[in-house]
Image (cartoon, rainbow, N blue to C red):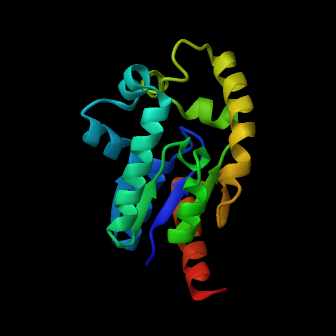
Amino acid sequence: MKPLFLVGYMGCGKSTLGRKIARRLHVDFWDTDHLVENREGATVADVFRYEGEERFREVEREVLDGVIARGEGGVVSTGGGLPVWRDNMECMNREGVTVYLRRTAGQIARRLSPYGRQKRPRLRGLSDDEIVNFMTGDMAARDPFYARARIIVDCENRSDEELVAFIVEQVAALEKGE
């Protein structure tokens, strides 16, 4: 199995679903944000704040390259901005299977806990309405990159279990050449 890269906006469920998909497939799970934090010895928010987005994106790409270099199949939850930076989306499509978990800004805002909002540097200090407005604009800019995924999944009105089953089925069909 090639790596399965989950892409989509922050808070869309990549890590939660990724863990469940990995368990179902009996493969490893990696979260690029956690790998960056382990490597840098700091939270994503702190890397952004003290070293800047450019440095964060560079480390994120190094982490992506490291996961790919393992040569193992597994499920990879990517940071929301990773597919947008340089040629990351093309790299993931070349090296594995990409799955875009598509949700609306309103759906994501409702999913985010207060902690989830605080740990995301770009959402800090925004009201509920401001978060939805910010996400709507930001998602519009990122969607063309996410939409390059080999599999696009509309997550609305589907339980995690339904999403996991659907994604596993779609990946299996793709690998069989259907």
- Asked where in the image residue 115 lies, by quadrant, the reply is top left
- 127 on left or right of 32: right
- 154 on left or right of 95: right
Q: Position of residue 33 (x, y in %)?
A: 39, 42
- 93 on left or right of 139: left
Question: Is residue 31 among the parts visible in the rendering?
Answer: no
- Asked where in the image residue 48 lies, by quadrant, the reply is top left
Q: As rendered, which of 155 and 152 lies closer to the eye? A: 152
In the depicted structure, whether residue 157 falls above or below residue 66? above
- 29 on left or right of 162: left
The residue under the point 49% across, 30% down is: 53
Q: How many marks?
A: 0
Q: Position of residue 111 (x, y in %)?
A: 55, 34
Q: Position of residue 135 (x, y in %)?
A: 67, 30
In the depicted structure, whether residue 78 falls above or below residue 164? above
Quadrant that contains the C terminus: bottom right
Q: As rendered, which of 162 and 20 lies closer to the eye? A: 20
Q: As rendered, which of 108 and 76 lies closer to the eye? A: 76
Q: Position of residue 1 (x, y in %)?
A: 43, 78
Q: As rendered, which of 146 and 59 lies closer to the eye? A: 59
Question: Is residue 40 among the parts visible in the rendering?
Answer: yes
The residue under the point 43% across, 34% down is: 55
The residue under the point 35% across, 73% down is: 71
In the depicted structure, whether residue 64 falls above or below residue 54? below
The residue under the point 44% across, 42% down is: 58
In the depicted structure, whether residue 24 falls above or below residue 105? below
